[in-house]
Amino acid sequence: MTGHGHIPDATVARLPLYLRGLDELLAARGGTVSSDELAELAGVNAAKVRKDLSQLGTYGTRGVGYDADYLRFEISRALGVTNTWPVVVCGFGNLGRALANHTGFTDRGFPIVAAIDTDMEKVGTVIDGVPVHAPSDLAAVVNDNHIAIGVIATPPEAAQAATDRLIEAGIGSIMSFAPIVLVAPDDVEIRAVDLATELQILGFHLTGSASPTEW
Amino acid sequence: MTGHGHIPDATVARLPLYLRGLDELLAARGGTVSSDELAELAGVNAAKVRKDLSQLGTYGTRGVGYDADYLRFEISRALGVTNTWPVVVCGFGNLGRALANHTGFTDRGFPIVAAIDTDMEKVGTVIDGVPVHAPSDLAAVVNDNHIAIGVIATPPEAAQAATDRLIEAGIGSIMSFAPIVLVAPDDVEIRAVDLATELQILGFHLTGSASPTEW
DNA sequence: CCCTGTGAAAAGGTTCACAGCA
DNA sequence: TGCTGTGAACCTTTTCACAGGG
């Protein structure tokens, strides 16, 4: 098999980990990587690495491994991160600002180029290097900056409205931190990250082990 | 089947969504919920809701639905969130502080009661209501506050050291925002949330649709 | 008639184990 | 010999469809 007839979701979700691992490795040295090494760098097992990479094409050399540089390029290409995708953040409170200051986004191709907030004190100013606009300006901001991704960091009550506006402005990829289910058409891709939910999943495995608060 | 012989991971990961949905519903009304309603509130399908809930026990009534209040209690119990689990945040920069200000944690049973930072200017002070301690005090802080969960919000370079210290202090559940694979014993549960990775997964589905930055 | 609870079928994902090429 | 690429086995998860109680 040579191409990406259709890459499984589970594989797509791991490609960024491989990319991250390769970057870490390439900072130290180039040359070849084995599936074993890459597995360790990404925190998965080697069989999975080989199966995943075989979905993209036949980029390895038997008995040797993968050319790290070339593999990096191919994974980037599959993920569509050979280019830069500017991001707009809706809601520029604590979380929104923390995201803007998070260098990891820009480093990995997703610069936060604009923020939207309803607080008129903020609108028109530049905070942490990011210009803040009013909600009504969203469509223009998206257009001017060729923005393809929106992040929702508003309070829960405002999240659906922000989503609606993003979609109206032509955004088809949304990452939400709001702890609610967002309603959107099927062709809009939404990734929801609910931090409290993550803790509750952790909490499950915790049950019974230690004793909680009161005593 | 009546009890949780062993609840599948996929189910555990969805229980918090049901809980969230039930809270939303209970804020408006009590009474009964059908699997259809709950499915909509949680953003999954009804068959899944029924299968998931049947893992916990037989709490529904055929032809009627589930008693919302009681179901809420049973899911809480399964997740171990009938009690409060205090959290310590390692790294009190932008992200750490944003988390501390995020009311969602406390609301859902995970109050951030302490922070650890290497910046001696911060150590000894109380920022946003959270006392900041030096790394060397971690074990004492964990003990004094009966902390069961640690969150890693340090720069990537410091994340492994923070993890080591948490484990040393007896913490067995860790949520990490660091974009690296953390090394830890098998009995330590780690949930890694890499925000840039999430964006890259979004980016995959974006490929080809819109035109990125340069043109 | 309505909605849960659940076997059975289908789909999706992971792991195994080894053939095959450098 | 070493490591990739991959069918086949296995396991998990999802979906279907309907029996059965209220």
Image (spheres, coloured by chain):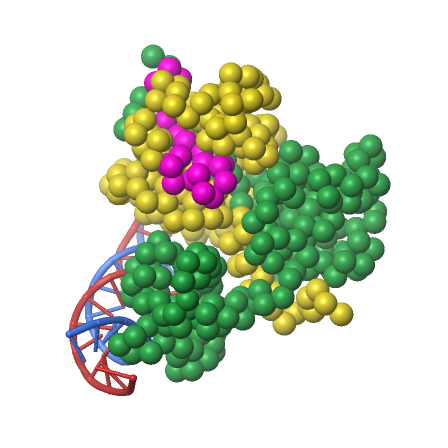
Chain colours: A yellow, B green, C blue, D red
Whether the magenta-drawn stretch holds residue A158 is answered as yes
Whether the magenta-drawn stretch holds residue B99 is answered as no
* Residue farthest toward the top in the current orientation of the protein: B215
Left or right: where B43 falls relative to A102: left
Q: Residue at x 53, y 59 (%)?
A: A201
Position of the N terminus of chain B, as image quadrant, is: bottom left
Left or right: where A102 falls relative to B199: right
Q: Position of residue B212 (x, y in %)?
A: 35, 21
Q: Residue at x 48, y 28 (%)?
A: A118
Compared with residue A208, is residue B173 higher up or lower down, i.e. above or below? above
Seen from the viewer's position, the closer of residues D20 and B165 is D20
Q: Position of residue B156 (x, y in %)?
A: 64, 37
Residue B93 sits in quarter: top right
Q: Residue at x 45, y 23 (%)?
A: A134
Residue A78 sits in quarter: top left
Left or right: where D20 falls relative to A161: left
Residue C12 sits in quarter: bottom left
Q: Which residues are magenta?
A: A142-163
Seen from the viewer's position, the closer of residues B195 and B24 is B24
Q: Position of residue B56 (x, y in %)?
A: 44, 74
Position of the C terminus of chain B, as image quadrant, is: top left
The number of callouts visible is: 0
Compared with residue A209, is residue A32 higher up or lower down, i.e. above or below? above
Seen from the viewer's position, the closer of residues A120 and A162 is A120
Q: Residue at x 46, y 70 (%)?
A: B69
Q: Can residue A124 be seen?
A: yes
Q: Can residue A23 be seen?
A: no
Q: Position of residue B109 (x, y in %)?
A: 60, 58
